Amino acid sequence: MSDLQDAAPRSAGEITSYHAHIYYDPATTRPEAERLRTWIGERFSVTLGRWHDVKVGPHDQAMYQVAFAKEVFAELVPWLMLNHGSLSILVHPNTTNPRRDHLADPLWIGQPLAVHGEKLPEETELEQASAPNTTPHLRP
């Protein structure tokens, strides 16, 4: 038997929160990324991260991060599927293994892009969802 056949299924309880990395090109699609960011902030209780107009960490393209609690996933992710326009979005869980979270267990909305796993640790402390910095006032 292989190791996979012997392994017990992983529990969704491993997930403490989620990140969505919204990628854009500063020269051509930043206005679209700005509009999407505004819409997200108006509709969802999330933490909107800083703009990174250059490559940062394992990300091969400009991006900003949206951090959100598990309870927001069911509304936010389908909404992103319908409203991402031409932008690529990486949605990943936060567990104790950031490399696995970004490379093996994510989902992509739009065109998948390169993620450099060698820049990510295999083990880390659990990340708790941070307090949202937005006050949504529109329905998703």
Image (cartoon, helix red, strand yellow):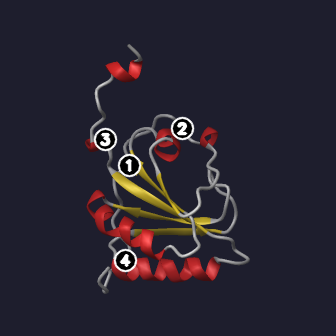
Decide which of tag 2 and tag 1 comes sooner along the chain: 2
Q: CA distance from mark 1 to mark 3?
A: 11 Å
* Residue furthest out toward the top: 1
Q: Count neighbours of disc 4 (C-alpha within 10 A) and say few if under 14, some if 14 to 19, many if 20 or more.
A: some
Q: Are the residues tagged 2 and 3 within 8 Å (C-beta)? A: no
- The three-letter amino acid code for the residue at tag 4 is Thr
- Front tag of 1 and 3: 3
Q: Which residue is mark 3?
A: 14
Quarter of the image where the N terminus is located: top left
Q: CA distance from mark 2 to mark 4?
A: 29 Å
Q: Which residue is mark 1?
A: 127
Decide which of tag 2 and tag 3 comes sooner along the chain: 3
* Secondary structure state at the residue bearing disc 3: helix
Q: Which residue is mark 2?
A: 121
Decide which of tag 3 and tag 4 comes sooner along the chain: 3
Q: Residue at x 41, y 62 (%)?
A: 67
Question: Quarter of the image holding residue 24?
Answer: bottom right
Q: Residue at x 37, y 67 (%)?
A: 78
Q: Are the residues tagged 2 and 4 within 8 Å (C-beta)? A: no
The picture places residue 51, in percent across and down from the top left corner, at 59, 70
* Secondary structure state at the residue bearing disc 1: loop
The picture places residue 89, in percent across and down from the top left corner, at 52, 63
Q: Which residue is mark 4?
A: 134
